[in-house]
């Protein structure tokens, strides 16, 4: 086996093992919170280079589709309102936790910069469609026949609702 193939295979196996370990270690809190923590293992790089490396962790949201509202029947229309209903989807924005060393200009210590952006809830509605036929309801004054009118079509706009937050800080420490 070539060294490049061997290195690629080792990197892939290491990534899979790290992902499985992260999911297995935090399966219960992840299911409760709706996010999956994804740590990025950089300890080996720090030990091999004998230096402090950034600490990085992420949270990926789990999307959960909801049940759409059914069509609404409106008096005087042949087709129901919201012929293609909007699909509600809830999930979250991905979270990030990063702590990186910054070389201190005046000494050998490290100052650190940190970014903490926790995963936040996200609620969305997919676009919908409302149609109406080019015929009116049956009219008793015209022997029960429907009349003609302009066809109507409307697009229900998608909706997105979230409150994102984060914290950026710098200071001494590990």
Image (cartoon, rainbow, N blue to C red):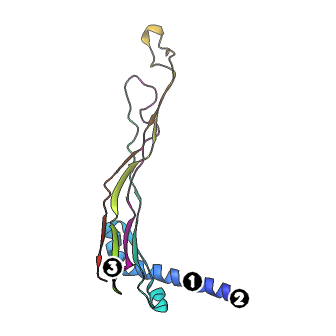
Residue 53 horizontal/vertical position (percent): 42, 82
Q: Quadrant of residue 116?
A: bottom left
Look at the picture and state if 108 lies above or below 37.
below
Magenta span covers which residues? 76-104
Q: How many marks can you see? A: 3
Q: In x, y percent, where is residue 9?
A: 61, 84
Question: Residue 164 falls in which quadrant of the image?
Answer: bottom left
Residue 146, given in percent of the width and then of the height, sits at 49, 16
Front residue of this view, candidates 35 and 58:
58
Which label belongs to residue 2?
Answer: 2
Q: Residue 16, relative to residue 48: is it above or below?
A: above
Q: Which mark is nearer the camera, 1 or 3?
A: 3
Disc assigned to residue 53? none
Residue 3 as seen in the image, left or right of residue 160: right
- Residue 11 got which mark? 1
Picture disc at residue 111: 3
Secondary structure of the residue carrying tag 1 is: helix
> Neighbour class for label 3 at 10 Å: few (<14), some, many (≥20)?
some
Q: Residue at x 64, y 88 (%)?
A: 6
Of 61 and 137, which appears nearest the observer? 61
Q: CA distance from mark 2 to mark 1?
A: 14 Å
């Amino acid at each position: 086996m070539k060294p490049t193939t061997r290195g690629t295979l080792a990197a892939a196996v290491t990534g899979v093992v790290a992902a499985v370990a992260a999911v297995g270690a935090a399966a219960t809190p992840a299911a409760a919170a709706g996010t999956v923590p994804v740590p990025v293992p950089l300890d080996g790089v720090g030990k091999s280079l004998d230096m402090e490396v950034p600490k990085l962790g992420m949270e990926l949201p789990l999307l959960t589709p909801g049940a759409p509202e059914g069509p609404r029947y409106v008096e005087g229309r042949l087709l129901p309102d919201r012929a293609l209903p909007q699909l509600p989807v809830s999930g979250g924005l991905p979270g990030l936790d990063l702590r990186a060393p910054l070389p201190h200009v005046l000494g050998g210590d490290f100052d650190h910069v940190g970014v903490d952006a926790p995963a936040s809830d996200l609620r969305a509605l997919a676009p919908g469609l409302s149609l109406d036929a080019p015929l009116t309801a049956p009219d008793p004054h015209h022997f029960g026949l429907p009349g003609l009118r302009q066809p109507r079509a409307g697009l229900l706009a998608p909706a997105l609702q979230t409150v994102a937050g984060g914290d950026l800080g710098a200071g001494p420490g590990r």
